[in-house]
Amino acid sequence: MLLAASCAQATVIRVGILRGAPSAAVSGVGLRASAGGRHIAVPVSFTVSAKGNSLVVGGKVCDSPLILTAVAPIRCGKAAYEGELVVRAHSGRITVVNKLDMEKYLRGVLGIEISPVWALEVLKAQAVISRTYALSQIGRHSGEGFDVCDTDHCQVYRGTNVHGQMTDQAVIQTRGQVVTYRGALARTFFSSDCGGATSDIRDVWGRPEPYLVVRREPYPSQSPKAEWEATLTASEIQAALAKKGKSVGVLRQISIVQRDAAGRPTLLRFTGSAGTATLTSAEFRMALGAKKVRSTFFEFSRGGVPAPASAPSYAPPRRTVQKSTSGAPLNEEEKLQLKALIAQKKFSVDERLDMLMYPDRERFYLNKALGLKNDAPGAELAPPPPQEAERTAQPAANAGISSVQVAGSVTLYGRGWGHGVGLSQWGAKAMADHGWSAEKILNFYYPGTVIQRR
């Protein structure tokens, strides 16, 4: 991947931070305001609401939009924002938009989209792909009066609340850098954990891209999301199939009929009393819910299907999962204890993320912080040594058609979290921890692309 020079210029982005709300609390130092194009006086702190298509600011009706600037970040609700806030009224509801420079926007993205305590090179890689993704999404919400939203529909954004020294440094050191393919912005999708090998985009969303293909990662990650289980009832699966217009009656069997070069299932066949139907694994995951079927990298048995002998990289190790009382729900007193320990910063960022994604692990971390004994959470297998991963995985023959009889329910044993397309954050972290530069990381996940400044 080459770094091609071009003229970098400031880009303004409009972020929807509040949509269809009855009101919003606003505060700031040195606030300057205009409503309907006319300057108005506002207090340091006030509430803005809607009356029809007009705004009510501090009890006074004024024209929409209300534009706010200040010498310091402006607080709206629970977060504070650089740049300006634009408040519009429509049919008794308000929309609040944060209008600011792209580089400032990225400061409010990185601190929430990736762990700010990770190595600088992985943060720089995230800054480049987040900038690229944001630029490619400008205008996505134009019908609502802004470019992007502040949720994972676009990218999660929390303003100055998540600013940090390392993430700010990553933004500064990569200023204006984007990933391109043949001169156009690349599609820089990313996920939390690909499970050891990325997905081919054509298996997830249909449209192929030469730089979004299966790539086996060179190192095992320490992701807390590396392993998962999901037990699905036959009725749940039948309902999901029905939503896709593919009812099969009483479900009897599920088969994996196609895999990608890494062995990940890509096409599933469902057999029932009323016939058969097929779904891609990505469709199946979305139909059941991405929080339950956390990735498409799953099997019907713990052992899974081994990687083909020609595989150019390692197969991620599996963990032995043991049932533990450490996952018992917390009572109210224990929840207060945990909340107090979090406030005292007794947990690392990764531990807080782990509890957020897996609430059943709260007791384990509470006991650990209090010095109490935990049941064995499962012994990790020693990972095999990393091998060269500069090569694209070769297509492997289907690693055997795997089937399971459905007698009331079926359990999936999976790895990774997310769609798996493009950069895997935990995989990129492992690379950075092994001395890889941001450029080398991006070259691995988006082969054939170029970094440019825009």
Image: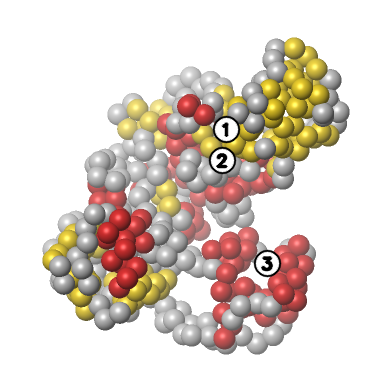
Whether residue 59 can be seen here = yes
Which element is circle 1 on? Answer: strand
> In 3D space, how far apart are the residues under numbered discs 2 and 3 (Cα atoms)?
26 Å
The amino acid beneath tag 2 is Asp
Inspect the image, locate mark 3, and give the three-letter code of the amino acid beneath it: Phe
In this view, the mark in front (1 or 3): 1
* Mark 3, residue position: 347
Determine whether label 2 and label 1 are within 8 Å by CB: yes
Looking at the picture, which amino acid does disc 1 mark? Val
Q: Which residue is mark 2?
A: 150
Q: Is 32 on the left-hand or right-hand side of 113?
A: right
Quarter of the rendering containing residue 194: bottom left
Q: At x 36% / y 38%, what residue is drawn?
A: 187
In screen coordinates, is 305 left or right of 350?
A: left
Closer to the camera, 353 or 79? 79
- Please identify the quarter of the rendering in which residue 78 is found: top right
Between 184 and 217, the residue placed more toward the observer is 184
List the residue tagged with mark 1: 15
Label 2 with label 3: CB-CB less than 8 Å: no
